Every structure is written in C-alpha cells, then in structure tokens.
Amino acid sequence: MRIAPSLLAADFSRLRDEIARVEAGGAELLHLDVMDGHFVPNISFGVPVVAAIRPVTRLFLDTHLMITDPRRYAEPFVKAGADSITFHVEASPDPRSVIDHLRRLNVVVGVSLNPNTPVDALEGLLDLVDLVNVMTVEPGFGGQSFRPEMLPKVRDLAARLRPDQRLEVDGGVDAGTITAAAAAGADTFVAGTAVFAAHDPAKAIGDLRRAAESAREDRHA
C-alpha cells in the first residue's frame, strides 16, 4: 500500500517545506500532475519544477503527463529527475511506441485511463507497463469527488495485472474512499488535499495507509 501525495494540492509558495513534511510523514512517492492546457483544461507545471524538486527530496517522483504529446516531452522530464512517466492512452495514436520510447529512457512506465475509457483500450499493452493509473475523477483539476463507478474497472485490472505490476487510483482519494479502492485491488493511491490540506500530513498519510491495508486484508480474508 503506497500513498502518493499529489503536489498539485501543496502550497506552492513553500514547496520545499511541503515536500519535506510528506517525506517525513512516510509517503513513498510524490505524484506530479503535469497539465498542458490542451489534453486537459488546465495548466500546472513543467520540467523546471521537476528539476527544482529533485535535489530536495529522495521521494520517488511519480510523474503523470496529462499532455497531448507525451513521447515528445518524456525525455526532458526524465532528465529533470522523474523516476516514472505515466502517460494517457487517449493522448497517443500509437501508445506502443510511447512505451518503447520510455523503456529506452530507463524509466518506470505507466499508462493512465480516463473515466470514460474502457480497460479494453489497453489491449496488447498491459504486459508492457509497470503501472496502470485509473482516473477516478475527470483529469485536469484537483479537489473533485471520487467516482465509485470506476471501481469495477479497478477490479477488472487487478485481476489482469501481474504481482510485480502496480495499480494506482487517482482522484478524490481520502479516508472515506480509499477503503473501497483498496478492496477493489488498487495498491497505490494518489491523494492531494487529503494529505496537503491536513493539519498533520504525517497522521493523514498513516491513516490512509492503515485504512488501505485493512481493506486489502479483508479482501483476501
């Protein structure tokens, strides 16, 4: 069970301190939502921010490219310090070529599905990636409510993935929704305001992890 605080929900006026708080609080990853204002209707941050973050944290930089041309921009993000690149299957007419390109960059490879995109869109791709990200909100904005109708998709993917592959849920994850996502088979949870807006981020991370672990144990009981 891995908790990935989403930097999009952090206070950007003091990013270094915000990152240090979640790192000290036990987060395993830092989720970086990169938006281009084209693939999604919002603009967030790009390569310079990733490059600025890399020297100040040992956290795994889980970099989510919500952009139109992920193959074109993947290498600059990897050079800036991204540990993984997750791209949207909807953003590329040839997702296999994007995966092949990412492999040549020696980076962890993820693929993401929008809420309206079926699992079948990953036909022939599942065996080639390290992580699948299921969007449980419409991508582009933080603070949205978790969509429980995405849980059957999570269960479907959990049954298809190998033990060495990760299944991530992204959007609306908090103490009230993480149990359902974990019970469905997810093992990595992107949480923005649930962590960064908490009075005690370390406690929030611990509470989220314990809730997920408990749900997973019940699933296997």
Image (tube, grey):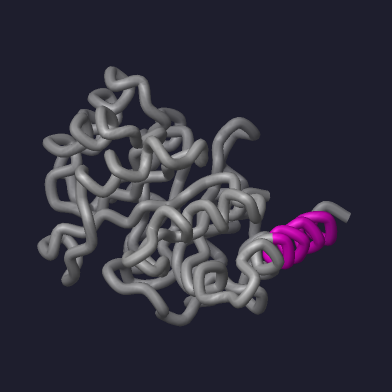
Q: Main secondary structure of the magenta part?
A: helix
Whether residue 45 is visible to the viewer of this picture, yes or no, is yes
Where is the C terminus found, in terms of image quarters?
bottom right
Q: Is residue 180 left or right of residue 152?
A: right
Q: Position of residue 155 (x, y in %)?
A: 60, 57
Q: Is residue 28 above or below residue 12?
A: above
- Dividing the picture into quadrants, the one containing residue 75 is top left
Residue drawn where x is 72% and y is 61% of the image: 206
Q: Position of residue 29 (x, y in %)?
A: 52, 46
Question: How many numbered marks have been drawn onto this rendered protein structure?
Answer: 0
Is residue 127 a member of the stretch shown in magenta?
Answer: no
Residue drawn where x is 13% and y is 64% of the image: 37
Residue drawn where x is 19% and y is 69% of the image: 42
Closer-to-camera residue (218/79): 79
- Dividing the picture into quadrants, the one containing residue 15 is bottom left
Q: Is residue 145 above or below residue 80?
A: below
Q: Position of residue 38 (x, y in %)?
A: 11, 62
Magenta part of the protein: which range?
206-219
Is residue 213 a member of the stretch shown in magenta?
Answer: yes
Q: Position of residue 130 (x, y in %)?
A: 47, 33
Q: Is residue 2 above or below residue 154?
A: above
Q: Is residue 155 left or right of residue 113?
A: right
Whether residue 187 is visible to the viewer of this picture, yes or no, is no
Residue drawn where x is 41% and y is 80% of the image: 144
Q: Is residue 21 above or below residue 56?
A: below
Closer-to-camera residue (169/12): 12
Residue situated furthest bottom in the rendering:
145
